[in-house]
Image (spheres, helix red, strand yellow):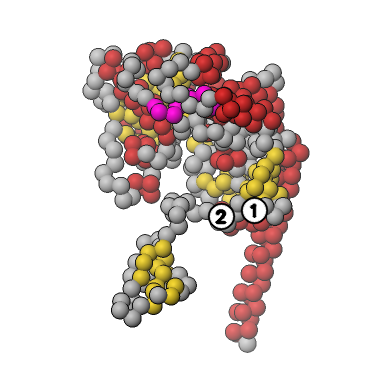
């Protein structure tokens, strides 16, 4: 039996795997399916990093990339941060995990600090943003049941949202692309246009329990909630007895220049979800809740195996040591303002490539005129890592410790990439013109 080169299977078009054909006289045409040991759920770029420092990542062959993706807004302190590395290493050497059957001093400290610097009265720790959002929905329903309204189970969400990849959260997200192939969507979620208070009010029924939205929609291309819409959310929740839940998975932990993005609006939620940058790259999520919402969750009503373990909370406390330091969040806001100005100039100078820039703090989107995948590839070839989003938007989500010099370098790379794309477009146009001329001759 001799193995030959894998070739696409002619009988399994679109199945996402290769076939290894075997030369066997007793089984003509026999083959076995070949698939990566890692499930093909991601379209991974053929690029691997060996180490990082600050806002930069390096490949094994020494190539340097400026990281303006930060693991999709996760690496809040960048790479190789001395304080974070030290905290993780020291805690790992003592005890990593003990379970929530026992007190965890590191979790108590982190919860106390989050409560002290937010609207919340109590915190639940988990492992990811999707878990935090799942738990948040449970808390909304449980609170309404505690108020004597067990019939109130439905949650109003907004079109263009992204709340995670679990079965319930893809239903909350409502994107048909994420729902396809997974059967009937989980019941209990109603969707309205983002920033449309009239539509939201019209969607409220006697079964509505709460409203769950992102202050800035990242997946759809960095779309901010209007101030009047955010203010109206609090008013409508008070009017109808609903729970206001904010998904701050991407916007929280200093990303916008405030600890949480809702602070910019002067609106107090009942419960929020947090993850991504909370532990600087260590897997962690959290739900921050008011006393009423938190008190509805008695012993046994929710749980987690790994959430809030000593190692995760040591990382979370190390991140807060930096984020809560005097002046740090103000600097994030200042760097964001500077980056926004640079991006506006970039759009002005390259209107064939970019249409507009929008964002807040260190969470920006460049709406492209050219296909965003093409723009991202060229930008990466020039040494800048970014993230794509909906509506043909290129997301820029650098570490919070990024410097102004880093931001200027990123914009210079974007400009260089734009010039290369414009030159390619010109060359293509010239070739088409020459081809037409030759054909007419």
Residue underneath mark 2: 45
Q: Farthest residue toward the bottom?
A: 441
Q: Main secondary structure of the magenta part?
A: loop
Residue 364 percent location from the top left of the image = 60, 39
Q: Is residue 194 visible?
A: yes
User: Quick check: 345 above or below 277?
Assistant: below
> Which of pointers 1 and 2 lies earlier in the amino acid sequence?
2
Residue 91 percent location from the top left of the image = 58, 25
Q: Farthest residue toward the left?
A: 151
In this view, the mark in front (1 or 2): 2
Q: Residue placed at 33% from the left, 39% from the top?
A: 167
Q: Residue 182 or 236: which is nearer the viewer? A: 182
Q: In what quadrant of the picture does the C terminus appear?
A: bottom right
User: Quick check: 287 above or below 369?
Assistant: above
- Queried whether the magenta region covers residue 403, the answer comes back as no
Q: In what quadrant of the picture does the N terminus appear?
A: bottom left
Q: Residue 30 or 112: which is nearer the viewer? A: 30
Q: Give the range drawn in magenta.
A: 304-311
Residue underneath mark 1: 380
Q: Residue 332 or 107: which is nearer the viewer? A: 107
Q: Which mark is residue 84?
A: none
- Queried whether the magenta region covers residue 309, the answer comes back as yes
Check if mark 1's residue and mark 2's residue have beta carbons within 8 Å.
yes
> Picture quarter containing residue 322?
top right
């Amino acid at each position: 039996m001799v193995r030959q080169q894998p070739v696409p299977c002619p009988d399994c078009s679109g199945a996402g795997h290769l076939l290894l054909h075997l030369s066997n006289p007793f089984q003509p045409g026999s083959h076995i399916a070949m698939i990566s040991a890692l499930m093909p759920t991601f379209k991974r770029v053929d690029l691997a990093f060996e180490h990082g420092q600050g806002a930069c990542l390096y490949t094994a062959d020494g190539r340097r990339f400026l990281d303006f993706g930060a693991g999709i807004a996760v690496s809040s302190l960048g790479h190789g941060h001395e304080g974070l590395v030290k905290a993780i290493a020291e805690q790992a050497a003592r005890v990593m995990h003990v379970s929530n059957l026992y007190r965890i001093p590191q979790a108590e400290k982190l919860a106390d600090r989050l409560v002290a610097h937010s609207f919340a009265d109590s915190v639940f720790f988990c492992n990811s943003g999707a878990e935090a959002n799942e738990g948040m929905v449970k808390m909304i329903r449980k609170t309404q049941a505690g108020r004597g309204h067990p019939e109130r189970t439905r949650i109003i969400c907004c079109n263009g949202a992204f709340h995670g990849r679990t079965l319930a959260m893809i239903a909350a997200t409502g994107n048909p692309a994420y729902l396809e192939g997974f059967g009937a969507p989980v019941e209990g979620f109603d969707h309205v246009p983002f920033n449309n208070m009239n539509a939201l009010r019209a969607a409220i029924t006697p079964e509505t329990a709460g409203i769950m939205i992102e202050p800035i929609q990242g997946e759809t291309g960095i779309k901010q909630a209007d101030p009047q819409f955010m203010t109206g959310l609090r008013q409508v929740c008070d009017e109808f007895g609903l729970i206001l839940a904010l998904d701050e998975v991407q916007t929280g932990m200093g990303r916008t220049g405030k600890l949480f993005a809702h602070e910019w609006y002067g609106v107090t939620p009942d419960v929020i979800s947090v993850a991504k940058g909370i532990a600087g790259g260590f897997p962690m999520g959290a739900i921050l809740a008011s006393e009423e919402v938190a008190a509805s969750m008695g012993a046994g009503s929710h749980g987690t195996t790994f959430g809030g373990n000593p190692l995760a909370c040591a990382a979370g406390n190390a991140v807060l040591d930096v984020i809560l330091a005097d002046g740090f969040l103000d600097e994030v806001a200042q760097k964001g303002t500077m980056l926004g100005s640079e991006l506006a100039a970039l759009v002005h100078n390259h209107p064939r490539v970019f249409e507009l820039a929008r964002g807040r703090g260190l969470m920006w989107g460049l709406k492209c005129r050219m296909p965003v995948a093409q723009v991202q590839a060229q930008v990466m070839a020039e040494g800048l890592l970014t993230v794509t989003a909906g509506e043909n938007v290129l997301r820029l989500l650098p570490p919070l410790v990024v410097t102004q010099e880093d931001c200027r370098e990123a914009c210079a790379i974007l400009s260089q990439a734009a010039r290369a794309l414009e030159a390619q477009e010109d060359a293509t146009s010239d070739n088409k013109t020459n081809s037409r001329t030759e054909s007419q001759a």
